Every structure is written in structure tokens, then in C-alpha cells.
Amino acid sequence: MILKARVVVPMDGPPIEHGAVVVDDNAIVAVGKAEEEVRWMDEGEVVELGDVALLPGLINAHCHLDYSTLRYSLSPSKSFASWVKRINAVKRTLTSDDYLDAIARGFRMLEKWGTTSVCNVEAFPELINIMAEPPIRTWWFYEMIDIRHRITTEEVVRGALEFFQSRPHSLSRFGLSPHAPYTASRSLYELANCCAETMQMALTTHVAESREELEMFADQGGPLYDFMHSLGRSMEDCGRQTPFGRLWNSGAVNEEWLLVHMNELEESDFALLAALPPERKPHVVHCPGSHAYFEHSPFPLRRLVELGVNVSLGTDSLASTHTLSLFVEMRRLRAKEPSLTARDVLKMVTLNPARALQRTGRLGTISPGAMADLIAVPIDNGGANVYEQIVDYRRPVPWMMIDGKIHNS
Ligand SMILES: [Zn+2]
């Protein structure tokens, strides 16, 4: 199949005016000028997409589809710990059917806004087995928490291993997600590393999300400290360390991990990042909408990028943001960081998350050998300022292809 578009935006090369992309089965086999590609391939269907920019499908590097029905249901709270208590109370009122409905709704929203891959942290992994094939490429990160009284670290890990015996869907990939340093023990992180290595899975965790998390680890106090203490968590690991420093220095996380948030960092954290060799710099996921909702400290994007950290974007869940559109997230970030170019911000939803997921050349790009995950965004003015036009696009994405299959809206 040949897809022809006013501009093809490969992301790892310059835009191609009057471009064409040749797709065979679920992969891209060629990309170039339309007249050359058509001559090159004289059979197969030609799809004229018209005045659009054809670009790689967007990758949402952090989401919780479980909470897609909780939009506007929790107002922001002054205290992070009290917000966690409130969402936990809401979660207890929901049934499996509610969560299945939420996940299906979340997928529809992701599709509507041109997302072709999502990293979804799943608190109820047993639901995956009774669900139909996800409509988009999905990394299901099995959420792991072991601070609860009734469950041991070993039971959490055994549950995950049993779950991964069955891998039902072709668009599904799997990963592990110890929740955060305040809810997952050091040994849970260690076991997650071992499992991920043997089973070739991705890893993600929340880290340094709130000032209260920093306060808990650095000062042995604050609302989150008190809340975790009341749950029976051993607080021996608190005091004189930052959440990131504690995880990194103990080997609980490394450059294989997607580290979500990293909002509240100390000078010691930046010094630690600066001292790492380039190949050991971590992958960080920033969620601009959720960040604004919680009023965290300004996200240190410039410093992280200058230190060689690979930054991607995620939406987080609809419990802490109002949309699953990465277009909105890109614009939010640019409003905070006006010096960021449209191309830079687009990389944070294509090339950068592909790299974090170890899918460089396979996702987030239009190049031979990449998966055929593509979206088309209408443009005008003959495609001038194409990156700006894409980031500024405000309507549902009218055309997308995932794994070589066209999804029409
Ligand atoms: Zn999250």
C-alpha cells in the first residue's frame, strides 16, 4: 500500500513535501517523494490522504486507563497524601465492570487524539485477560504495591509471574511497575528487575512526584510520612536521602527504567545525574497536565535535557488531568517553556518515548523497518511551518493506521 500526503514528517529526518510511505503488511518499507515511490512500486493500493501531514503515531509514555471515568471527580487537594486517600476511597466504590468501562473509554479517547501506543499502568491486571484486543499498541505495566499488611513482597511477585504465563493479545506488551518508593519496598524493586530481565519486560515507576514524597525521604516527616507510617510501612529508609537518590544509589532503578515525574529534585539529584556517563542517563516521563493540577514545583526540563536525560510526555490519568490528548500536553509544555521548538516537543511523543521503550527505529519514526503506526493531521498553507501546525492541531485526528491497519474515525 502507498500512502500519499502533502507532507510526510518522518521525525528522524526533514519533512518531505508531496511525500509517500510504502507499507507492506504491518511495517514501513520505504519513504520518499511521491512520484519516485509510485514509480518504484507499481502494484498495490494507493491511498491519497490529501492536504495532511503524515507523521508517526503518538506515544503516551504514562497513563492509568483504570481511572478514565474519574474526570473532574476529585478536586485538587493542598496535600498530596490527602488526595491519595481520597482516590483510594473512590476506587473502593468501583466494580470490575466500572474499570472495564473506564479502560474502554480511555482507549477511545487515546485513539481520538492520535495516540497509537500507550504505557498503561494497570492496577487490576486480571482484567486484561477478559478484555478484547486493545485497539492501540499497549504496554501493560503490572502495578506492584507491597506496603499493604495482608500481602508479602513474594506474593506480589508470584502474582505477576503467574499472570505473565498468559499473554493474550498481539498488540499487547508487558512491563512491571513497582508503584513508587513510598509504596514499594526495596526488595520489590529488586525482584522486579530480576523478572524484567528474564522475561524481557519494560519497567516503570513513579518517583519524586510531590514535595511530600521528598519531605518523607529527606526529613522523615510530613503528611505522606504520617500516612505511610499509619499503614504500617517500615520508615527505616527515610531520612537524609531524596526519593530519586535512594532508588538510584541502591540499584533499585537504572537506565532501563521509565522514571515518571521527577518533579521534586534536589541539587544532589542533579549532581548524581551529571556524574552519569551518557549511556547510563535515565529516561524521564513528564505529565504536564497532572503537574499543573497538583501544583508541583516547576518541572526542571531544561536542566534535565542539558544533563542528557531523555524526556518523554505522558498524560497520567483522568483523575488528575482533564484530557488524554497529547496535543494538549504538548501545548501545555510549550506554554511553560516558550523556547522549546514545536519539533522538540513532538520528539517527546515520538522519538524519545520510542527510545525509552527500546524501540528506536521501530516506533516514533517513519522509516524503513518501522512499524506502520501513522497518523494524518490536516494542514494548510501548503504545509508551511509543519511542526507548528501539527502541535497546534485542535480537532480529533481523522485518520490513523496501527500495525498496518487503517482506523477511520
Ligand atoms: Zn501515574
Image (spheres, rainbow, N blue to C red):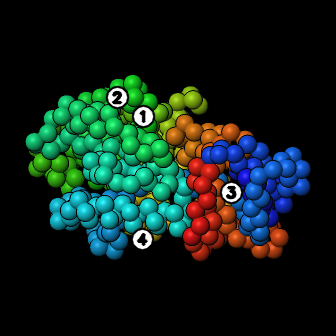
Q: Which residue is mark 1?
A: 201
> Depth check: 108 or 358 in front?
108
Q: Amino acid at mark 4?
A: His
Asked whether the residues under the numbered discs 3 and 1 touch, taking CB atoms below 8 Å apart as contact, a structural biologist would say no
The type of residue carrying mark 2 is Cys
Q: CA distance from mark 2 to mark 3?
A: 35 Å
Q: Position of residue 325 (x, y in %)?
A: 51, 66
Whether pointer 4 and pointer 1 mark residues with C-beta atoms closer than 8 Å, the reply is: no
Q: Secondary structure at mark 4?
A: loop
Q: Is mark 3 within 8 Å of ligand 1?
A: no
The answer to whether marks 2 and 1 mark residues whose Cβ atoms lie closer than 8 Å is: yes
Density class for disc 4 (Cα within 10 Å; few <14, some 14-19, many ≥20) is some
x, y percent for residue 154 = 19, 30
Number of other residues with Cα within 10 Å of mark 2, as a class: few under 14, some 14 to 19, many 20 or more: some
Residue 39 spot, x, y in % from top left: 89, 50
Q: Secondary structure at mark 2?
A: helix
Q: CA distance from mark 3 to mark 1?
A: 27 Å
Numbered circle sitting on residue 55: 3
Taking the image as shown, residue 288 lies to the left or right of residue 152, namely: right
Question: Amino acid type of disc 1?
Answer: Met
Mark 2 or mark 1, which has the lower sequence index? 2
- Quadrant of residue 296 within the rendered picture: bottom left
Give the residue drawn at x 16%, y 51%.
226
Evaluate if marks 2 and 4 touch, with contact meaning CB atoms under 8 Å apart. no
Residue that label 2 marks:
195
Which residue carries the number 4 mark? 322
Mark 3 Cα-neighbour bin, 10 Å: few <14, some 14–19, many ≥20: many
Q: Secondary structure at mark 3?
A: strand
Depth check, front residue: 84 or 316: 316
Which label was assigned to residue 277? none
For the C terminus, which image quadrant?
A: bottom right
Q: CA distance from mark 2 to mark 4?
A: 35 Å
